[in-house]
Image (cartoon, helix red, strand yellow):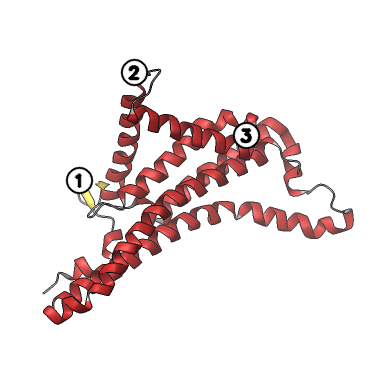
Amino acid sequence: MADPNKVDPIHQFLITPVVSFGEGGFAFTNSALFMVLTVGLILAYLLLSTGRRAIIPGRAQLVSEMLYEFVANMVRSSAGTAGMKFFPFVFSLFMFVLVANMFGMIPFFFTVTSHIIITFALALLVFAVVIVYGFWKNGFKFLKLFVPSGVPGYVLPIVVPIEIVSFLSRPISLSVRLFANILAGHITLKVFAGFIVTLGALGWLGWLGAILPLVMTVAITALEFLVAALQAYVFAVLTSMYINDAIHPSH
């Protein structure tokens, strides 16, 4: 009989302690472990691949340079040349989300971006950077962000509240978009994989019927790799666009 935990699509998202320090006290969880592994892998790869910068780059250095140029072009196109001062911030977010998503594609690994508390914390960080820098650079002119240029004065009492609500909803939309896509994808993948296990328990006839779920599992796995990379890109490009609002609040 199949283990219920291996079939249950929600079990993979449970946060469990890896190391506990006293009863009811501080615990180092699987979520924290994979966040540490994510950051550690990124640092190790970038340091090792760029430690000896060669004129003719090897494969590892080439990938690092391609990632650099990819994010740099994204920031320039979204926030202009002035936005390049935020390149380390955007690059760090992009790499963290990308590697965390890819970690989640490995069997028995934990997907930290499938938890709203993680994605919301990242979104709040972006939100805080935008607000702090916007007021630091522009002062109260930053509030022009809520007053679109060219809008007649008699319409402003309607438009300004809409702009404020839209701005305040950004952390929610930014975090829910990443969380929901990763969560839904992993649940769908686990459901179809569960069909294979369930049908396989019925014997040869069940294995014959499991061919379709197997094909769907392979297809969804390929799609999830694409979604993992795409969501990292979307998170980074939206961050760049929000930073552009802090640099150029008048629009």
Q: Position of residue 160 (x, y in %)?
A: 76, 54
Q: Residues within 10 Å of mark 2 (few under 14, many from 20)?
A: few
Residue at left offset 32%, top offset 68%:
216
Q: Earlier in the sequence, mark 1 or mark 2?
A: 1
What numbered label is drawn on residue 19?
A: 1
Count of all numbered marks drawn on residues in the image: 3
Q: Is residue 48 above or below residue 5?
A: above
Q: Position of residue 129 (x, y in %)?
A: 57, 38
Q: Earlier in the sequence, mark 1 or mark 3?
A: 1
Identify the amino acid type marked 1: Val
What numbered label is drawn on residue 63?
A: none
Say if mark 2 contacts mark 3, CB within 8 Å.
no
Identify the amino acid type marked 3: Tyr
Q: Earlier in the sequence, mark 2 or mark 3?
A: 2
The quarter of the picture where residue 250 lies is top right
Q: Position of residue 11 (x, y in %)?
A: 26, 64
Quarter the C terminus occupies = top right
Q: Nearer the viewer, residue 109 or 26?
A: 109
Mark 2 or mark 3, which is nearer to you? 2
Q: Which residue is mark 3?
A: 133
